[in-house]
Amino acid sequence: MPRTQKKSISAEIRIKEAAHKVFLAKGFSATTVRDVAKDANTNVASVSYYFGSKKELFNVVMLEKLGLLIGALAPIVNNESTTLEEKIDGIVNSYIEFLKKNPDLITFTMNEIRKENFEFIPRIGVSKLAYQSPFMRQLKAEYGTINPIHFQVTLISMIVFPFVAKPMMVQSGLTNEKMFHKMMEERKLLIPFWFKAMLKNK
Amino acid sequence: MPRTQKKSISAEIRIKEAAHKVFLAKGFSATTVRDVAKDANTNVASVSYYFGSKKELFNVVMLEKLGLLIGALAPIVNNESTTLEEKIDGIVNSYIEFLKKNPDLITFTMNEIRKENFEFIPRIGVSKLAYQSPFMRQLKAEYGTINPIHFQVTLISMIVFPFVAKPMMVQSGLTNEKMFHKMMEERKLLIPFWFKAMLKNK
DNA sequence: GTCTATAAGGGGATAGAC
DNA sequence: GTCTATCCCCTTATAGAC
């Protein structure tokens, strides 16, 4: 029975992993507890047993998804000992790599947040990252006349938005997996180059 | 009875308008036909009568939403008699104005497309706009060594992504309606300036 | 901890009156 | 064209056996 050996992992973990997968693919409303239980190789009752309700399970998933999004950025942005240029290169490279492994994460999280308020969002540290990070201070020190939020938003936009538009680009015939991969590899070099050009033209 | 005079408009139109509103707010799965019927001031049977099913109604809405997204861009991008710089200014200004009136449109459409394939997407002209427009030809003529799709994606990213991130930025305390409005007004000037700087640094 | 069975209600769709 | 009543399936959640 090498097939469904998954039973050896605790049911709680299997359910959470299944929830990550199914919620991401279908969104909160289109997902049923049965979907999740089936994917976790267990039954609906155990979902209630471990997580209380569909909504509570979803909140656990959302919190972890947001943790991933922030976690991939925080160490670079908060590094006290790198230059601004090093941070730009680091952000572009790691975030593109991260999103290539998690292409649906942005659209999923931003859409769920759009549809509903999550009371835990103020506590995950987005504001702190944007307003109190060494990255922000370095931008401010060098380009003080423009609100540094503009530079941060612009850099993240150039990295992230292609992943938001990807399904549309693929379905419209504008690109495919291979072309998209190539485009994002090119952008690892183009975005830092362009972003630094932008900064210099202040 | 000035209150629910809406009855004077045909039920078909009322249903479609309600569908636009409710689907946008909740997404396909979380929307019920009963929600739509109630908002349209009619009953569930008339939804079937005019549109066949929830899914067919949704397809009508999606097609029109995508028409809006493309329609706000097409006249500028396809204009044969404006310069590249004029097109950049035009795209930034009109698209920001358009999205300020429709802030949820991008996240909604991109997420629904992500979750499901829509067979009509190849026929709405995204590819043609990207690959055969005067805008594309002007980019290619001046900056032929880099695939012009990169410039198009970058320009659209800088305009559109703030609207995708807005709910997150608001809920995290990073911004509010007033600050966001101000930021987007500033970007009407900053984006063309930055984008042209990018092009010159080719 | 795990599971089956079931309660309680909501959902899309339609029959058939008007 | 419009509406009410109803069909029938699917959903979340839980009781209670093991």
Image: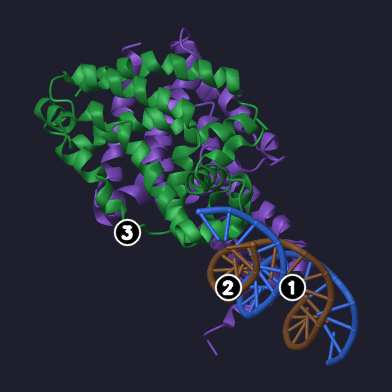
Chain colours: A purple, B green, C brown, D blue
Q: In screen coordinates, is A84 left or right of A116?
A: left
Instruction: Determine which residue is flagged by label 3.
Output: B119
Q: Earlier in the sequence, mark 2 or mark 1?
A: 2
Q: Nearer the viewer, residue B72 or B194?
A: B72
Query: Closer to the observer: label 3 or label 2?
Result: 3
Left or right, B66 with respect to B33, comes to left
Q: Residues within 10 Å of mark 2 (few under 14, many from 20)?
A: some
Report the residue that reaches farthest toward the left: B141
Give the numbered dot on residue A39. 2
> Residue at left 36%, top 57%?
B118
Can marks 3 and 2 be said to lie on one chain? no
Query: Closest to the observer: A85 or C10?
Result: C10
Asked if residue A105 is positioned above or below residue B152 in the image, the reply reads below
The image quarter in which residue B86 lies = top left
* Circle 2 chain: A
The residue type indicated by label 1 comes to Ser
Does any portion of residue A36 appear in the rendered image? Answer: yes
Kind of residue at badge 3: Glu
Residue B32 seen in the current view? no
Q: Secondary structure at mark 2?
A: helix
**Place of residue B24 in the rendered image (x, y in percent of width and height, measured from the top left):** 52, 44
